[in-house]
Image: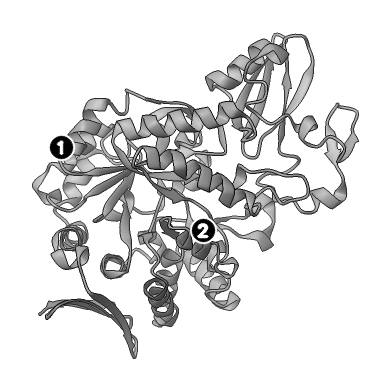
């Protein structure tokens, strides 16, 4: 696949219908062959779409007609499936709250006390606290135990597993809940839900499905409950059998340090690999005027035959956890400082500064808002092995939105753009030059069918050479002055 556009359905001019109009403009002709639409196109309530109530379309943002229009333009869809959890407002959890022990979905979610039975002690609030030998192994995404106490109609309080966000409000003696509730993959109803959801996404026209938070789904006493092995891979294999039925290609989303080699396991199992290493490596290389580590990574992709999807920016921050073992720790810290000095924001896992995860910033701001650097990095992305994915805000040279930080740290990089703003920028070189590079990547036949790709380092330059018979297409990128040239023979 050629370049993939990435945005929320309302990121550009307010709806998917308007984005279709944008992609039909002459400036965008032949630039994208795919579109990754983030999950607020579904019925959702929190986390800008990642807390899904159900996978029906949120028609105020996207309609079947919009998806059909993209298909007619030859644009393939990449959509999200959140494997680990669904919203408190999902019909399954609402049925549980309404019917308690009589709900057919009682086992659809993970009863915390049943899970930890015989592995801890009950406290005064009726919650089992796992023994220290188990707690010390667990990976937490928020302070405290990952659970939500739910009150059944008969007054019984039952804790359910809740890895991510939760909130309880009480008014006039009635409790209401918000949150993302972990599903129980031991339940046949969950696997029926997985199957039905993948079919629904295929019916929308998806060709790639990104599995969000899949590594949290398999849980077992005595394991971290993130990336449990072999359970994670067994679950992925079972999900892939459903995907195969509907001709869907899976892209498992996982952040882990390079040294753990999880990306290699995913690649060896035949799945697409998210290249979470490229964003940080490129920033480091431009900052240090030294592409050595980027050169090593590009050749590893080639040598190992990894099928990657890469990016500069995305809806999350710029990954840094992933770089451990690929970049020396000192260089990771320098890269983080560089981004933060350019206005980036660091949020650490569970408030622990030794557990850094990502730096939130637009890619343009992370590069010091220097136009040539952004165009330079885009050119390299277009020639990197793998499928390039392009965050809409980077395409329009978006800068850090500090006012939006009040709504959450990730909002610094999620500014919605108006028609007027985009139309003005479509006359600017920083946008048009990126579109030109995208068009080359999308239409030049050598990217679809080449005999060899060579990546060579010469002093402070990288050379990417695609070869097909006697023909070649070459990018020479100079990290001293951020100049580049593309030549064809």
Q: What's the residue at 53%, 75% (across, down)?
A: 327
Around disc 2, counting alpha carbons within 10 Å, would you say few (fewer than 14), some (14 to 19), or many (20 or more)?
A: many
Query: Can I make out residue 328 in this image?
Result: yes
**Which mark is drawn over residue 471?**
none
Q: At which x and y percent is residue 64?
A: 26, 26
First in sequence, mark 2 or 1: give its number.
Answer: 1
Q: Please say which color scheme the image uses.
A: one colour
List x then y, in percent, for residue 42: 40, 29
Q: Which is more toward the observer, 403 or 76?
A: 76
**Secondary structure of the residue carrying numbered label 1:** helix
SS under mark 2: strand
Q: Quadrant of the C terminus?
A: bottom left
Q: Which residue is mark 2?
A: 359
Q: Identify the residue shown where x is 51% and y is 58%.
A: 359
The answer to whether residue 213 is seen in the rendering is: no
| Residue 326 falls left or right of residue 361 | right
Residue beneath label 1, please? 72
Task: State which quadrant residue 328 falls in.
Answer: bottom right
Figure check: 194 above or below 482: above
- Which quadrant would the N terminus be assigned to in this image? bottom left
Q: Position of residue 148 (x, y in %)?
A: 71, 29
Residue 356's x, y, as percent? 61, 60
Q: Residues within 10 Å of mark 1 (few under 14, many from 20)?
A: few
> In the picture shown, does residue 277 fall above or below 486?
above
Of the two numbered discs 2 and 1 in the rendering, the one whose residue sits closer to the viewer: 1
Query: Marks 2/1: CA distance?
Result: 37 Å
Pick out the residue farthest to the bottom: 459
Q: Is residue 376 left or right of residue 185?
A: left
Q: Residue at x 38, y 38 (%)?
A: 245
């Amino acid at each position: 696949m050629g370049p993939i556009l990435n945005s929320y359905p309302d990121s550009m001019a307010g709806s998917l219908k308007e984005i279709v109009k944008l992609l039909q403009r002459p400036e965008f002709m032949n630039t994208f062959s795919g579109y990754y639409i983030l999950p607020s196109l579904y019925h959702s309530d929190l986390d800008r779409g990642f807390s899904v109530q159900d996978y029906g379309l949120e028609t105020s943002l996207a309609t079947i007609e919009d998806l059909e229009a993209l298909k007619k333009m030859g644009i393939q869809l990449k959509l999200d499936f959140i494997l680990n959890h669904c919203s408190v407002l999902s019909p399954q959890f609402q049925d549980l709250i309404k019917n308690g022990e009589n709900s057919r979905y009682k086992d659809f979610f993970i009863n915390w006390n049943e899970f930890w039975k015989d592995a801890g002690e009950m406290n005064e609030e009726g919650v089992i606290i796992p023994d220290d030998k188990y707690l010390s192994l667990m990976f937490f995404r928020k302070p405290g135990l990952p659970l939500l106490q739910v009150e059944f109609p008969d007054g019984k309080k039952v804790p359910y597993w809740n890895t991510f966000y939760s909130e309880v409000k009480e008014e006039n003696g009635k409790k209401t809940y918000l949150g993302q509730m972990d599903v129980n993959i031991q339940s046949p109803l969950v696997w029926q839900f997985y199957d039905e959801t993948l079919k629904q996404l295929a019916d929308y026209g998806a060709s790639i499905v990104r599995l969000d938070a899949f590594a949290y789904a398999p849980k077992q006493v005595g394991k971290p409950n993130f990336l449990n092995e072999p359970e994670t891979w067994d679950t992925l294999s079972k999900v892939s059998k459903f995907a195969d039925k509907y001709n869907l290609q899976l892209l498992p989303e996982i952040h882990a340090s390079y040294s753990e080699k999880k990306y290699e396991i995913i690649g060896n199992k035949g799945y697409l690999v998210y290249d979470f290493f490229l964003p940080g490596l490129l920033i480091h290389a431009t900052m240090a005027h030294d592409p050595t580590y980027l050169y090593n990574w590009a050749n590893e992709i080639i040598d190992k035959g990894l099928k990657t999807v890469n990016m500069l920016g995305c809806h999350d921050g710029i990954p840094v956890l992933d770089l451990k073992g690929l970049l020396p720790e000192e260089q990771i810290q320098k890269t983080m400082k560089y981004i933060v000095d350019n206005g980036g924001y660091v949020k650490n896992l569970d408030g622990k500064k030794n557990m850094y995860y990502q730096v939130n910033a637009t890619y343009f701001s992370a590069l010091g808002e220097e136009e040539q650097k952004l165009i330079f990095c885009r050119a390299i992305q277009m020639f990197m092995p793998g499928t390039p994915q392009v965050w809409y805000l980077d395409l329009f040279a978006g800068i850090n939105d500090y006012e939006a930080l009040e709504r959450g740290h990730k909002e610094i990089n999620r500014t919605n753009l108006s028609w007027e703003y985009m139309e003005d920028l479509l006359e600017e070189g920083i946008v048009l030059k990126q579109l030109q590079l995208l068009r080359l990547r999308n239409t030049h036949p050598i990217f679809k069918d080449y005999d060899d790709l060579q990546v060579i380092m010469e002093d402070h330059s990288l050379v990417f050479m695609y070869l097909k018979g006697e023909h070649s297409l070459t990018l020479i990128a100079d990290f001293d002055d951020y100049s580049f040239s593309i030549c064809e023979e």
